[in-house]
Amino acid sequence: MDIRELDYSDHLEIADGVYWVGFADAEAGFHCNPYLIVDRDEAVLIDSGSRNDFSTVMLKIMRTGVNPNNIKRLIYQHYDPDLCGNIPHMEAMIDNEELKIISHHDNNVFIHYYSVKSPMLCIEDLGFAFTFASGRRLEFTRTPYSHSPGSFITYDTHTKVLFTGDLFGSYDADWSLYSRVIEGCARCEPSADCAYSGKPCQIMGLWRFHRQVMTSTKALRYALGIIGEMDVSMIAPQHGSVLHTPLARGIVMERLKALEGVGIDGYISGGEAHG
């Protein structure tokens, strides 16, 4: 795979049966990443996206060869409009009586205002898992207050891809689906531009995002501690770039663990979180 030659106008398979179906905009500094998981004649859509992105997301879903009516679950790892805004359009397009929404009950209180008709399930009532007919499992783990009370992450046991919602998200002036983090990123001081490539610094984008979006340093480190114990092949956030190499995952994990001034902590101390 040559990540420099990717065609973002089409869907992209990032792992076996796992597709990025997002919208890429060269002028934007903030990108959303819906993911479609396909297992035989069943499909699940994670964090389906905003209202404005619906046509792009649905077109890419259909280009994978999936009939939208085979989508059985819509998973929302928190309740922001950039994830949930197109729920009514998804419900109108997907003609499947089995369609249900999976989230946490703290999120469902707000997702209710987007959804027109789909039953809403709580991950706790599901035993923190969804199982395809084939036996392939998606496992859910709570990461409360990173950044909403009901936030959680989703782990595909088949590919070991971890879908992390806003965790590992980033503001990107020069976005790419796959991370450009390299060995030197472990040592340098983040700045506007990368000292090695001259492109906008991805660590700086990660720091800015987590300081502004996560609720506190404690909440972020709690979530990172959980993720650090998991056997992961790839981290697929809802914003920013996929961490597809052990090097990128390790460096970003350590840089985020060391981050201070997150959320309310930064606000109280007069730091960068809301500056």
Image (cartoon, helix red, strand yellow):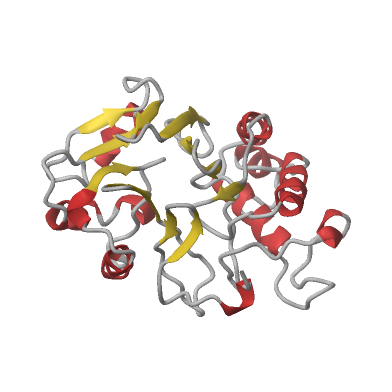
Q: Quadrant of residue 204?
A: bottom right
At x 54% / y 37%, what residue is drawn?
146
* Quadrant assignment, res 244: bottom right
Q: Residue at x 63, y 34 (%)?
A: 227
Q: Nearer the viewer, residue 79 or 230?
A: 230
Which residue is painted at 27% across and 65% down in the image?
62
Point out residue 237 in the picture as x, y percentages from the top left corner: 53, 51
Viewer-nearest residue: 16 or 43: 16
Q: Position of residue 134 (x, y in %)?
A: 34, 36
Do we see residue 189 in this rendering? no
Residue 126 placement (x, y as % from top left): 33, 23
Question: Quick check: 24 left or right of 215?
Answer: left
In the rendered image of this protein, does residue 187 appear above or below residue 130? Answer: below
Q: Where is residue 269 drawn, in percent x and y?
A: 71, 41
User: What residue is rendered at 56% in x and 38% in y?
Assistant: 215
Q: Quadrant of residue 55?
A: bottom left
* Number of numbered discs on residues: 0
Nearest the viewer among 183 and 245 is 245
Please state, as top left, top right, bottom left or bottom right, where the N terminus lies in the image.
bottom right
Q: Is residue 262 above or below residue 183?
A: above
Depth check: 144 or 16 in front? 16
Residue 176 seen in render: yes
Residue 205 lies left or right of residue 26; in this view the side is right
Question: In which quadrant of the rendered image does the C terminus lie?
Answer: bottom right
**As drawn, which residue projects farthest toward the right?**
187
